[in-house]
Image: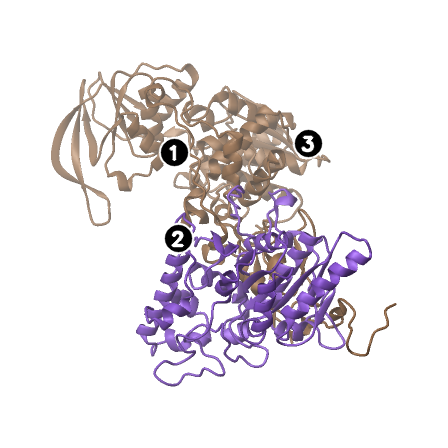
Chain colours: A purple, B brown
Amino acid sequence: MLDAIKFYQTGSKTVGNRLLNPSMRSNQASESRPNTLISGHRACQGCGEALGARYAIDAAMRATNGQLMIANATGCLEVFSTPYPESAWRLPWIHSLFGNAAAVGSGLAVAARVRAKKAGNTNVPRVIAQGGDGGTTDIGFGPLSGMFERNDDVLYICYDNGAYMNTGVQRSSATPPAARTATTQLVGSEPGADWGKGKNVPLIAMAHGIPYVATASVADLRDLEYKVQKAMSYHGARYIQILVPCPLGWGCASSSTVTVARLAMETGFYPIFEAEYGKVTSVRKITQKQPVINFLKLQRRYAHLTGKKGDPKVLARIQAMCDENIKSFGLIGDEVPETVPVAIQALERNQTV
Amino acid sequence: MMNKSFAATLNPATSLANKTGSWRTLRPINVFKLPPCNKQCPAGENIQQWLYFAGEGDYEHAWRVLTENNPLPACMGRVCYHTCESKCNRGFLDESVGINSVERFLGDYAIEHNLSFKKPTRETGKRVLIIGSGPAGLSAAYQLRRFGHTVHILEMAAEPGGMMRYGIPVYRLPRNILDAEIKRLTDMGITIECNHKVEDILKEKEEGHYDAVILGMGASISTNVDIPQGDTTHVLNALTVLGDIASHTDIEVGRRVAVYGGGNTAVDVARSLRRLGAEPIIVYRRNRDKMPANEEEMDGAIEEGIQVKWLSTITNAQKDSLKIEKMKLNDQGWPEPTGEYEDLPADAVVLAIGQNVDLSVCKKVEGLQTEKDAVTIDKETMQTTVAGIFAAGDMVPGTRTVTAAIGMGKHAARGVNAYLKGEVYKRAEKHEDAKFEDMHPWYYTDAPKTVRPQLELARRTQTFDEVQHGLTEENAIFEARRCLSCGNCMECDNCYGVCPDSAVIKLGPGKGYEFNYDYCKGCGVCAQECPCGHIKMVPEKI
């Protein structure tokens, strides 16, 4: 989709470019971007979630012409953006419980439709429900599946940082294997988070046959904006999962947020793809393939793998997991995979990685 | 107004009351670093800056930035050995930017569009005499004129340009280009008097009521070596041959000509003779690795079928042949005789082993110190040991190239300007180097270097048409946009985009960005994601 743009100087990867026609620059490059999540919020230094939320919601604002409201699950994003008596949001935003963001979103969408109908207004505001990986993959999973199953007109965005960061870095079902968290300490023969646990929610969402499912990353803004915009062009249930590094929980430098997210893409650790009606339709190709160690060594949660005492077998296993992602999602090469990729957890359980 | 229940409804954007800047221990600042091309350029051109404007398609602006340091871009785009390109950081990524080609495009663009230099806004009334109208003299004259001084150039030859006219072959620098760029200088009010050889510097200075003098006579005497020869052999020197070819476009030298030497002049002579139908053979006492000639020029010579006799010295010249002694290199890389001889058929020998400065006129000035083949100068101000007399170009110690001469001319002019104001010129301090390690290569896509189309070999050897053609506009823009903008902002909006706290303010096109220290938490993402290393994190004073 970005192949048509030839920058020569900075590639299609920078946020903007003075040589480009403003309409071809990213939404974030605009001086008049909505800044839906404004300064003064209390996210940590270098917060990937704050960055990802502004990227995504700003893009959705543009796609909906500002007719947008948000239901937010409990979590970091909710806590740091709205400590009483301040709010960093600049659009209608509601928080109810940890697990019910998808259900609240569904309700908002129906209410918006009814209100618009009563007022004789054809312009129905759109709804985004959002939460962290804990509120999405664990606690809010039932309402989320229900929202998918009913095909309610809601875009659900999951900001995936791989653990419950707000309460002190506890494991979630999105925590990758071998990662150290407060509840997966370095004990036993396989230290860190267990192998063969967890779930792949994007693939589960695809199994619901909903119109649009995508993964994205804060390291590829143009891809992220494109996906949000595309998701808003559909009606019905949609799901986007954005990888948002957490410097505190992952134990990386606050300045490395975007770098770590980029390495997650470039190593195949976090496949970036989109699927329409259950079928993968495009894949973000790896531009410069790197070994997974480059991703791991920037993070203290993997320090037990990358130091002198690191177990090369575990490292090889994570590398095999990345290679499997590259293969099944077709992250290198020109093709889009024809079959539905298998969740990596299946392969973990099957002991093939 | 909405009736809000307590603590359940918050007003939008109220977080702005929370000045998160107080969390900061590191502060991002914009730094301007010295790109390696600028650092390398002997003329001190601000290459990164003019590529910036060229990449936007604003060629006139680019040309104006370029000509702040170098008044002869169309000439330099042809004859400069572009050492800048060998330092280009893009070389680590794919291939270095074709800086020289873009310079030439801009120079040609300015000629085509009749761009002229701005005249000085005020005249100082100070008079400066420049002796020699080579690159150093012209560059100095240009800079002095920009300061508002009255400049007069004396030239001993029939036309201005120095070695650019009488040394550099036409196939490298067409004379209409040189004429156009010199005319632009005389249009500024610089006067050039040709056929005037200066015999007494002080007398000229006094009679013309000049406040200062810049010596730029160059190195115009060919170095001689004594080769025992029969009466019938031709032994010529390179400058005479090149000068004759430049003035008459033809010269009788014979068919097989040995060119003795391994520098750029030797290659120029050989390639010029080839175009006259001769079969030149370069005789050099060392090997290709040790050869001082520019590599591209030498490749061109070999492609044109010019033969080279490496590790050889001429010991004797007979009627139709030369006696050649084979050499071998010692541990230090210097040639040593082997005592083995062979004969090389040749009708003539052209000596191209170096050039010397004619110091005779300088020695007449009392107190003007000279050293071996140069005038002694203060390296900072370019002033000689006599107050008010400055020197630049080949006649001062340093690299003897057109580009170096232009740089020296510029500094001499600044030295004179300070002297005329009763000050001492001090060169500006340089910014910190922009290293490749400071850059973020991931953000730059691969784009191949646009290769200048070369004249077909067959045509090249028979005519004095230019060997290197310029770039088309499309290619020039492509090439200019390949610049990584090392150490200087290129307005990619990355810092503005990646800030999780929206604490970077975009000031609009051409104005760059500002940090909002009220909210900047000092995370450093902007610095890490800046493609060109323009942002630095410095400790906050607490």
- What amino acid type should be assigned to the residue bearing mark 2? Ile
- What amino acid type should be assigned to the residue bearing mark 3? Lys
Q: Which quadrant is the C terminus of chain B positioned in?
A: bottom right
**Which of the numbered marks, if any, corresponds to residue B529?**
none
Instruction: Please tell me whether residue A171 is drawn above or below residue A115 in the rendered image.
Output: below
* Measured Cα–Cα span from mark 1 to mark 2: 62 Å
- What amino acid type should be assigned to the residue bearing mark 1? Asn
- Residue highlighted by disc 1: B356
Q: Nearer the viewer, residue A294 or B64?
A: A294
- Residue highlighted by disc 3: B119
Task: Choose top left, top right, bottom left or bottom right for residue B185.
Answer: top right
Closer mark to the observer between disc 3 and disc 1? 3
Q: How many marks?
A: 3
Q: Nearer the viewer, residue B280 or B189?
A: B280
> Considering only order in the chain, which callout, 1 or 3, is on the residue closer to the N terminus?
3
Q: Chain of mark 2?
A: A
- Residue highlighted by disc 2: A332
